[in-house]
Amino acid sequence: MTTMEEHQRLLHRLAEGPQRLASMVTRTADEALDYRDESDGTSARLLLAHLADLEFNLHWTAYVARILYEANPILASTEKDWRAMEHRYIYQDARVALGTYTMARRHLVTQLRTLSPEAWARQGTHPERGPQSLQATVEGFLRHDDHHMTRIAALLAAFSQRA
């Protein structure tokens, strides 16, 4: 697969994120979204708010901008637990979070569609993962989505089996 084909594949996967998430939560009752895993207290609502927060408020668009316009920037860590408390994930409306995620993701995909192969190769340094290209950063966004969407699906399945 050529570099351009790989970038198109990544863009397609990024663009699918909102639809994947919507298919899980759009018609889901609040009770199911608030069902918490006994081992870590996570709920689908908390994970959805986290996805929206990172997409809109902090990281993904900012990561891309910093990699594109700064020389080897040091990227921020997500600090998940602090962000969950500070941004009051537990009280966020799941449908609003989905809309926020969707809007911000569309913006990110639009921004990435215009990039040259040289731009995709630019580097930034993540505090836990070290130096990485913009392409590797985007691949990380997708792994992050997959991880949390798999977790949301499992939580919703556990809730439905409980009932």
Image: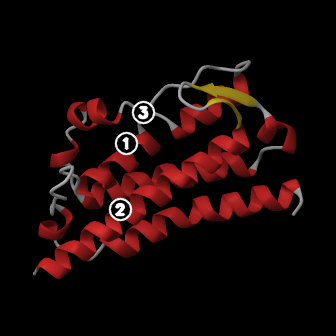
**38 relative to 111 in the view: left or right:** left
Q: Of the numbered discs in the image, which one, if any, rests on residue 18?
A: none
Question: Within 10 angstroms of label 3, few (less than 14), some, or many (20 or more) residues?
Answer: few
Query: Quick one: label 3 or label 2, which is nearer the N terminus?
Result: 3
Q: Which residue is mark 3?
A: 78
Label 3: element kind = loop
Q: Give x and y (percent) for residue 157.
A: 26, 76
For the residues bearing labels 2 and 1, Cβ distance under 8 angstroms: no
Q: What residue type is disc 2 on?
A: Arg
Which quadrant would the N terminus be assigned to in this image? bottom right
Q: Using the rendered view, name the quadrant where residue 147 is placed.
A: bottom left
Q: What residue type is disc 3 on?
A: Thr
Label 1: element kind = helix
- How far, Cα to Cα, is label 2 from label 1? 17 Å
Query: Quick one: label 1 or label 3, which is nearer the N terminus?
Result: 1
**Colouring rule applied to residues:** secondary structure
Would residue 42 be seen by someone viewing this image from the given angle?
yes
Q: Which residue is mark 2?
A: 151
Which quadrant would the C terminus be assigned to in this image? bottom left
Task: From the image, state whether disc 2 or disc 1 is nearer to you.
Answer: 2
Q: Using the rendered view, name the quadrant where residue 96 is placed.
A: bottom left
Q: What residue type is disc 1 on?
A: Asp
In the rendered image, the vertical position of residue 29 relative to residue 18, given as above or below:
below
For the residues bearing labels 1 and 3, Cβ distance under 8 angstroms: no
Q: Residue furthest right?
A: 2
- How far, Cα to Cα, is label 1 from label 3? 10 Å
Would residue 28 be seen by someone viewing this image from the given angle?
no
- Rendered residue at 60%/20% (across/down): 74
In the rendered image, the vertical position of residue 20 relative to residue 81, given as above or below:
below
Q: Which residue is mark 1?
A: 53
